[in-house]
Image (spheres, helix red, strand yellow):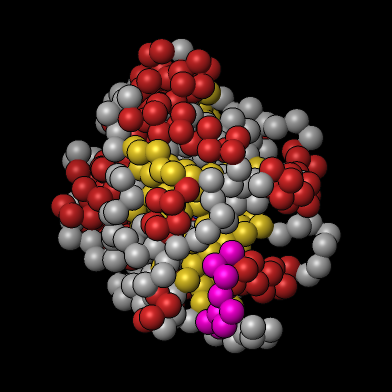
Amino acid sequence: MNASPRQEGHGISLWQAISSNGRDWPALHGGICVDLAIIGAGFTGLSTALHTAEKGLSVAVLEAEQVAWGATGRNAGFVVPNFAKRDPNDIVAQLGPDRGERLVDFAAGSADLVFGLIKRHGIECDAVRNGWIQPAHSPAALEKTKSRATQWASRGRPAVALDDKSVTELTGVRGYAGGWMDRSGGVLNPVEYARGLADAAETAGARIFEHTRVSSIGRIGDEWLLKTVSGEVSAGKVLVATNAYGGALNRTLARTYVPLKVFQIATAPLPRETRARFLPGGQGFGDTRRNLFTLRLDKENRLISGGMHIVGIGAEHRVPLAIWRRLARELELKDPPPLQFSWSGLAAIEPDFLPRLVDLGPGLIAGFACNGRGIAMTTAMGKVLADWASGADARDLPLPFAPPSPIPFHAMVRYAPNAMLPWSLLRDRLER
Ligand SMILES: Cc1cc2nc3c(=O)[nH]c(=O)nc-3n(C[C@H](O)[C@H](O)[C@H](O)COP(=O)(O)OP(=O)(O)OC[C@H]3O[C@@H](n4cnc5c(N)ncnc54)[C@H](O)[C@@H]3O)c2cc1C
């Protein structure tokens, strides 16, 4: 095995490097007045802008860096219409039959919405919709995935349980006990998808400003006033769509989620004869391990995988190499293609792993829908937030809506997932 692989794209995401639609939007100079101001141009902000502008409202999106600069441009591109670590029945048990089933429905239709938007707006983003697979790493996990498939199928979703042989055939990876697949999921190039949403939002009338960091949110009469270095926006309603990158803008909000640093790698393209071995149907997968193993390929047949960093153990720059070695091991590749890209991003993890809307004041909302399921969930969140922007009561939307609830001991808890990683690794191994 090549022990010191080449790293051409260290730091910038594969998607940023290979995406074609690279247009720039201007920075805001001067003052404007809109119905809805959106802070952050990731999937949440862009989907909300598109759906709100389509309803005829005036919308401005203010982005500190560039469109898709945050987690949106750094993720793996899996379109996953279900919840990380949560199942429909337990959500219904937690939220009650009405609110629970509405949230489950919201997630269930989220991939339909993504692929529908791609079709409707002609977004070229290498979308492949052949399903998303979750292989089970142990007998206990297999029972969970069987139940998961049954729960989604009983709600009319195209969910199927898979035995060990089917998982090996579909993924090309051996050793799994079985798993399940949601056929409505898929993969795409997230940067091209986001840029396509931005173009569609602009065509619908939204204004997008890059290099426009919002430094403060204030209230003047019935309006909100957002200040940036070279301009200001007066708005009837404001959506904070800054995900795990909002930091200094609202410190209370920053304590309501755990910002999880996740690394991604992409290899050089696989030779054609090896490519046929892995995910021949073009799906993507993320298994049931605590330190989950993910895999997909891009259109040029690069292998793409990811992982976390163990706090205090080794330097961060070694993480991509560790993920690359794991990839070679899991795929039993004696001569793995060299590492070509490595990058990282922040995912906002909610304590209950559910998407949520945070009530920050009259007409001021923050939306979080990440938990590693952001592409589908944030897009769907944008659609319901457009209803709120045009007059619906936030309490009537299908998502939990509550004032900020800071996580106790956040300064320590925020490091918990990384600090717990060695323990997670051990438990994953013992269960197998
Ligand atoms: C490595 C990684 C892999 C992932 N893989 C997947 C996957 O395969 N599938 C999936 O569904 N989800 C995945 N996710 C989650 C998904 O990427 C996110 O849920 C989603 O992109 C969040 O979108 P967002 O619009 O809410 O936030 P972001 O995309 O993070 O955007 C927030 C934006 O706010 C801007 N901002 C912050 N502060 C300000 C300010 N003061 N003024 C103006 N702008 C500001 C930032 O610059 C940023 O662009 C992954 C996440 C990571 C980190």
- Identify the image quadrant of residue 101: top left
- Identify the image quadrant of residue 403: top right
> Looking at the picture, does residue 278 appear above or below residue 178?
below
Lateral position of residue 353 relative to residue 384, left or right: right
The residue under the point 63% across, 39% down is: 257
Task: List x then y, in percent, for residue 60.
Answer: 34, 50
> Looking at the picture, does residue 199 appear above or below residue 270?
above
Q: Does the segment drawn in magenta span residue 36?
A: no
The residue under the point 39% across, 28% down is: 150
Range drawn in magenta: 330-344
Task: List x then y, in percent, for residue 69.
Answer: 48, 63
Q: Nearer the viewer, residue 160 or 193?
A: 160
Q: Nearer the viewer, residue 169 or 57?
A: 169
The residue under the point 18% across, 54% down is: 119
Q: Does the segment drawn in magenta span residue 339?
A: yes
Task: List x then y, in percent, for residue 426.
Answer: 76, 49
Asked if residue 166 can be seen in this view, the reply is yes
Q: Nearer the viewer, residue 215 or 392?
A: 392
Asked if residue 365 can be seen in this view, the reply is no
Lateral position of residue 162 relative to residue 415, left or right: left
The residue under the point 20% across, 38% down is: 55
Give the position of the N terminus as an image quadrant.
bottom right
